[in-house]
Amino acid sequence: MENEIFTVSAINAHINKMLKRDPNLKNIRIKGEISNYRNYPSGHSYFTLKDEKSQIPAVFFKFNKQRFLEFEPENGMKVIVKGKIEVYETDGKYQLYVTKIEKDGIGDLFARFEQLKKDLDKEGLFEETHKKEIPKYPKRIGVVTAKTGAAIRDIITTIKRRYPISEILIFSTLVQGNQAAPQIVRQIRHAQEFDIDTLIVGRGGGSIEDLWPFNEEIVAREIYACEIPIISAVGHEIDFTIADLVADKRAATPTAAAELAVPNIREVKNNIGQLSNRINKSIENKIVENRTRLSHISQKNVLKNPESIYEIKGMQLDNLINKLDYSSKTIISQNRNKLFRIENSIVLKKPEEIIKAKKDRYMKNFNKLEILNPLLTLKRGYAMAKSGDKVISSAKDVEVGDEIDIEFDDGTVNTKVI
Amino acid sequence: MENLSFEESIEKLEEIVNRLENGDVPLDDAIDEFKKAMDLVKICNDKLNDAEESIAKIVENNGELIDFNPE
């Protein structure tokens, strides 16, 4: 075998064969913590099983999941995994083929995360009202992330493509491991010494352990205290980190963060073009509207024939004069008639005739009265028989023996009927 | 007006457009506003066109800025 030359496939196949020969690896149980758990459309799941020092990739096929899975595995869970270890020859790596997963208490990291999340939430660090608005048109973007790696490249590329007029300041920091959290805090603080509109804080995707600095309390508090609006960009689409919850805005990836941070310059130009059109249109409308109003006003007769004002007024004046003339004439003629009548009245013309007429009437009435006076009759020799005050006008009205008065012109005689 | 930031300029522009479109502005004022708006459009466009390609810089711990070229 010493001089034999292997192909890559042959050596991987050989190693696999050796592993399969070991009965211990055929059916083993391994204790560890689930990390970077992913479900694929195929129905298979992939994750990493790890402890403090080491890790092993694991695959959980759909077939086994359907038969043996009793719960939905989550990152940070402490589990006991049953399965076999073989080589995945295509990639040349050995991995754990899972047949069954059992819970082994909740992972420490996970528990710590939940506790911190609860505490900070209660304290109000995630409050919507505290979140600052991200400026629409930033002049300067700050980025707190590692200067090596895909995250910063994606952010710069995206900003240059969308909004090339803004400047980018990079505050480089470790983004995983024990030193990361204090460095992130220091760089967020440092960024505030510069005139920065929006700060992106983040890193590319990774396992929950990799992302852990963004779950640290000091990072959360620094983000909360920062005066610059912060977009978090911790590349992990499924779970939120604490940093995501505190940040003013959360993006799932660094690229998405850059897209949130700057507008698309083409849209901005279009928008300005539209504003310009709208303003031209509205001033045009304004002018047309005023012109219409003007021509409408100038069409009015008064302005077309100003003399018509005088014509109308003249007519009104004529009318008034007519009225005045008429009524004065009427008054004069009425009074003249009255005067004429008075002047022509008989009283004034022949007063003696009225006196004579009145005298004639008086004499006539006087004579009538004279004829009717009974005393005059007595003067002519007649007498009037009376019983008391009553005049006796019939012989039947008296009886023999009645005392009656006979009244003469010059006196009364008391007699007795015999 | 040249001292306004881009954001302030475009906000001011939007404000004028909305005011003019509401229609109650007297003609003289509208014409003044229109001139102002046209100046703002020019300022905004200048700002968008004149700026150079965005530059990325690394900020050192001592505050020094160094051009950054991602490898």
Image (tube, rainbow, N blue to C red):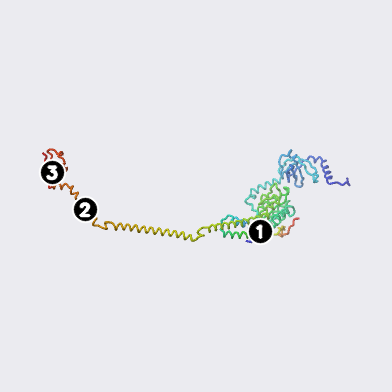
Amino acid tagged 3: Ile
Compare marks 3 and 2 and give the one earlier in the sequence: 2
- Which residue occupies 41% across, 59% down? A322
Is residue B23 something that shows in the picture?
Answer: yes
Numbered label attached to residue A406: 3
Can residue A179 be seen here? The reply is: no
User: Which quadrant: the N terminus of chain A?
Assistant: top right
Q: Are marks 1 and 2 in contact (CB under 8 Å)?
A: no
Residue A325, position in %: x, y? Answer: 39, 59
Q: What element carries label 2?
A: helix
**Would you name the residue on which mark 1 appears?**
B45
Q: What element carries label 1?
A: helix
Q: Position of residue A139 (x, y in %)?
A: 67, 57
Dot 1 crowding, Cα within 10 Å, few <14, some 14–19, many 20+ = some
The amino acid type of the residue labelled 1 equals Asn
Structural crowding at the residue carrying mark 2, measured as other residues with C-alpha within 10 Å and reported as few (<14), some (14–19) or many (≥20): few
The residue carrying mark 2 is: A360
- What chain letter is assigned to the residue under label 1? B
- Name the spot of residue A197 as percent of width and height, x first: 66, 56
Cα distance between the residues tagged 1 and 2: 126 Å
Q: Which chain carries label 2?
A: A
Badge 3: few (under 14), some or many (20 or more) residues near its Cα, within 10 Å? Answer: some
Residue A359 placement: quadrant? bottom left
Q: Where is residue A97 in the image (x, y as percent from the top left)?
A: 77, 42
Tag 3–tag 1 contact (CB < 8 Å): no
Mark 3 and mark 2: Cα distance apart in space: 38 Å
In the rendered image, the quadrant that contains the C terminus of chain A is top left
Is label 3 or label 1 in front?
Answer: 3
Q: Is residue A245 above or below residue B8?
A: above
Give whichever of A130, A404 is nearer the camera.
A404
